[in-house]
Image (spheres, rainbow, N blue to C red):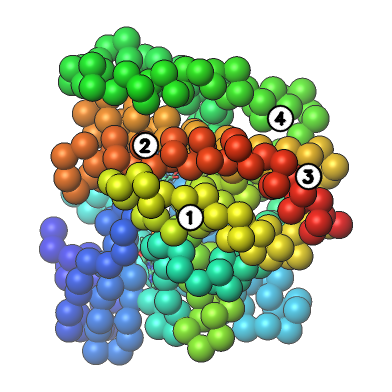
Amino acid sequence: MEIVDVVKTFLPNERVISYEPIGNGHINSTFMIVTDKNKYSMQKINTNIFFNVEGLMSNIDKVTEHIKKKAIARGEDPHRATLNFLPNVETGKTYVLVDDQAYRMYEYIDYVFTIEKMEKPENFYSAGLGFGAFAKELSDFDAGQLVETIVNFHNTSSRYRDFKKAIEFNYNNRLDDIKKEVKFVKDRKYFMSLFVNKLENGDLPLRVTHNDTKINNILFDKETGAPATVIDLDTVMPGSYLYDFGDAIRSGATHAAEDERDLSIVDFDLGLYEQFTKGYLEACGDSLTPMEIKMLPYASIMLTLECGMRFLTDHLNGDTYFKVHRENHNLDRARTQFKLVDEMEHHIDDMTAIINKYAK
Ligand code: ADP
Ligand code: GN1
Ligand code: MG
């Protein structure tokens, strides 16, 4: 079915004037739709990855409603607080299934900009404030209301097992060329279970978190640079603050793109690290337990290592998960992540000092 026909099932009284693909997400397909009345984002949800669309959209409905209620209580505009999904006129839900594909629509946010690669430190401070505020808003949300949209999403031990399986099968005969990268991961085998064990034995609390706090998953106000809206809510589910902090650092505390081929320019920048940490802890530092604070310096290493390992696993599996746009794209991505891990490991004391400076 054509995009235009799908739009009609949400907006029977509007006429589509144009549509174009937007964004650089690795999972869903996103379009900006212009009608005779308004602008919208439409997404085709990747159902190879998100099997339970009903559960996923029910999570998003509950979370966005919770965020809106909080905004109202603060005397703020609920409409600006989060994404505004449209009900589908045929299903009455916030999604529709057409020819086995799942679609959703939300109002396009015009007054914002996005960042793919960090250039201005103040934007990263702002991202810290935004993701920290998001954590705070969900701190009283009952995790039992949410389904796990991807099981074991940040269970790094389970991700390591997937990586070992990919090596064992070596379906695409890519193993010979990546011995160095495989060794890098295997050398860190014992690190993988650090958070998993602490979550299992209760040393770390389970939280409701975003779980995909990449820098292009937050929108910034064009006029003020302030955090506007956290987007890409597909993985909001029980998790840990360490995941959100770590993943944001992974993607934003560097000047290089995630798929940069020239590793000499892939840097871990402590100045950027400090900016995000300052914003994040300013916004939600008082919600963190002493153990969470103690583990924060390891969060960026864990999440960057995990992400690199996921890219490498996908490379071995023949690029079936993340969208790729060139040969060895996932391998290039894995290499940037391992370069960052290596640099972060050398700065653990500096990261600890920065966290202690801003911890409440
Ligand atoms: P994915 O799961 O594929 O990452 P996202 O929900 O993150 O999907 O959307 C992909 C990209 O589209 C985002 O990184 C962002 O750049 C862009 N985008 C999505 N919605 C909006 C919007 N309302 N305004 C501006 N940009 C948007
Ligand atoms: C994916 O959907 P997107 O592009 O924002 C992935 C994240 C990875 C990220 C790496 C559901 O995020 O977990 O960290 O790519 N999302 C999913 O860039 O797997
Ligand atoms: Mg995204």
CB atoms of marks 3 and 2 within 8 Å: no
- Give the amino acid at mark 1: Thr
Please tell me whether mark 3 or mark 1 is closer to you in this view.
Answer: 1
Query: Which residue is the site of mark 3?
Result: 293
Residues at discs 3 and 1 in contact (Cβ within 8 Å)? no
Residue that mark 1 sits on: 254
Task: Give the class, few, some or many, for how many residues have Cα within 10 Å of label 3's Cα (few <14, many ≥20).
Answer: many
Q: Which element carries disc 2, helix, strand or loop?
A: helix
Whether label 1 lies within 8 Å of ligand 2 gets the answer no
Eyeballing the image, is 320 above or below 179? below
Could you tell which of marks 2 and 4 lies nearer the N-terminus?
Answer: 4
Q: Secondary structure at mark 4?
A: helix
Residue annotated with mark 2: 334
Q: Choose mark 4 or mark 3, whichever is in front.
A: 3
Task: Confirm or deny contact between disc 1 and disc 2 (CB under 8 A).
Answer: no
Q: Which mark is residue 269?
A: none
Residue identifier under label 4:
199
- Measured Cα–Cα span from mark 4 to mark 1: 29 Å
Q: Is residue 217 visible?
A: no
Q: Nearer the N terminus, badge 3 or badge 2?
A: 3
Q: Quadrant of residue 203?
A: top right
Kind of residue at badge 2: Ala
| Camera-side mark, 1 or 2 | 1
| Quarter occupied by the N terminus | bottom left
